[in-house]
């Protein structure tokens, strides 16, 4: 194939829609409305998923900037330094920085609305 037919390479867009960023990453445990609660099908000793949606009890106040959320994904530790027991950090740790920043932007934008 002639490379000139392909045109100039274009950068991938930043994902900012939770349906794109969080379909498999968040909604399965935190729920369609990100309200948190008991994780469907989870063992009885698992803690409930925290609320990511705006409102009383939302954990997003603990992650005021993208760096704090990125730190959670990379280390598996909350903002206070305590370990998160239930999250698939083996794969989440590999999420690229652009997608994590987009996720933070989406979640923090929900808080303001």
Image (cartoon, rainbow, N blue to C red):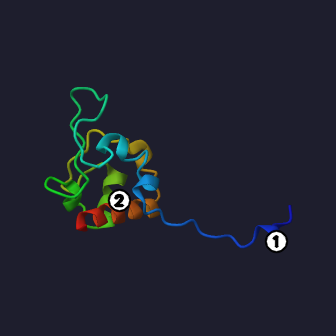
Q: Residues within 10 Å of mark 2 (few under 14, many from 20)?
A: many
Whichever of labels 1 and 2 marks the residue nearer the N terminus, that label is 1
Q: Nearer the viewer, residue 33 or 103?
A: 33
- Percent coordinates x, y for residue 52 in the rendering: 26, 53
Q: Name the quarter where the N terminus is drawn.
A: bottom right
Residue under the point 38% across and 41% down: 88
Indicate left or right for 15 with 44 as reference: right
Task: Label 2: state its secondary structure.
Answer: helix
> Disc 2 marks which residue?
70
Disc 1 on helix, strand or loop? helix
The reply, left or right, for residue 79 in relation to residue 66 is left
User: Which mark is nearer the camera, 1 or 2?
Assistant: 1
Q: Closest to the observer: 57 or 80?
A: 57
Which quarter of the figure has residue 65?
A: bottom left
| Image spot of residue 109 (x, y percent) | 30, 66
Q: Choose top left, top right, bottom left or bottom right for residue 86.
A: top left
Q: In which quadrant will I find the C terminus?
A: bottom left
On the image, numbered disc 1 is attached to which residue? 4
What residue is drawn where x is 28% and y is 49%?
34
**Residue at the top extreme, as displayed:** 44
| Label ID, residue 94 | none
Q: Single out the residue that lies furthest toward the bottom.
A: 8
- Along the viewing direction, whichever of 75 and 21 lies nearer the viewer: 21
């Amino acid at each position: 194939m002639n490379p000139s037919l392909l045109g100039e390479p274009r950068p991938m867009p930043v994902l900012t829609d939770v349906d794109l960023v969080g379909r498999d990453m968040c909604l399965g445990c935190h729920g369609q409305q990100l309200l948190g609660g008991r994780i469907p099908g989870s063992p009885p000793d698992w803690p409930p998923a925290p609320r990511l949606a705006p409102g009383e009890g939302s954990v997003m106040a603990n992650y005021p900037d993208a760096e704090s959320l990125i730190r959670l994904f990379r280390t598996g530790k909350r903002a206070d330094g305590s370990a998160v027991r239930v999250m698939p950090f083996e794969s989440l740790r590999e999420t690229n920085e652009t997608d994590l920043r987009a996720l933070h932007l989406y979640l923090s934008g929900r808080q303001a609305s």
